[in-house]
Image (cartoon, rainbow, N blue to C red):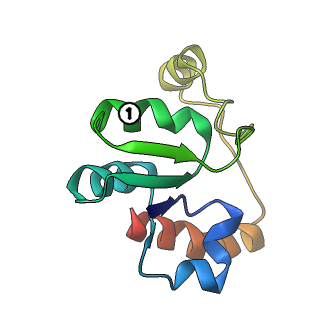
Amino acid sequence: AEVLVHPESSGAVVPEIRNSPRVTIASTTGMIKHLKASRAKKFLIVTEKGVLHNMHQAAPEKELMLIGNDANCRYMQLPTLPKVREALCSGGPEVKVPEVLAQRAYGPIKRMLEIG
């Protein structure tokens, strides 16, 4: 099986995982693109379980095995459609972080966007 790993998962930083030729580390969109393009039929999925629905829709002929049945990311559950609508309508809430933290976060966010 091939392994699809979300860059925010703990497995993405393990050198043995990162350097394996069977592992693809990508954003959710990147994982789905790889899944559809790959000739492999079986995939181990290392991400939040809510992503599986979209993966099954994109490639129903592929066998997807989620690593861990309790793979929930509480942060991915926070943005709801009503909250997104409210933010778009009101222009907020604005999130402010200290400049030092913003500078430290820039590199990992940039890398994640480049992977995806």
Position of the N terminus by quadrant: bottom left
The residue that appears at 56% across and 64% down in the rendered structure is: 7
Which residue is under mark 1?
A: 56
Disc 1 residue type (three-letter): His
Looking at this rendering, what residue extends furthest in the top direction? 82
* Of 112 and 45, the residue lying toward us: 45
As rendered, which of 57 and 9 lies closer to the eye? 57
Q: On the rendered image, what quadrant is the C terminus found in? A: bottom left
Label 1 element class: helix
At horizontal 33% and vertical 43% (from top left) the residue drawn is 62
Image vertical order of residue 58 relative to residue 111, above or below: above
The percent coordinates of residue 79 (x first, y second) are 61, 29
Relative height, residue 90 to residue 104 (above, below): above
Residue 58, quarter of picture: top left
Q: Is residue 7 left or right of residue 41?
A: right
Q: How many marks?
A: 1
Q: Position of residue 69 (x, y in %)?
A: 70, 38
Query: Where 78 sits versus 64, above or below?
Result: above
- Picture residue at 40% right of the left edge, 43% below the top: 63
x, y percentage for residue 50?
A: 56, 33
Give the residue at x 71% y 65%.
Answer: 10
Badge 1, how many Cα within 10 Å: few under 14, some, many 20+?
some
Residue 90: give x, y in percent of width and height: 55, 21
Q: In the rendered view, does 48 fall on the left or right side of 112?
A: right
- Seen in the image, is 11 located left or right of residue 100? left
Residue 87 placement: quadrant: top right
Q: Give the vertical position of 115 relative to 59 (above or below).
A: below
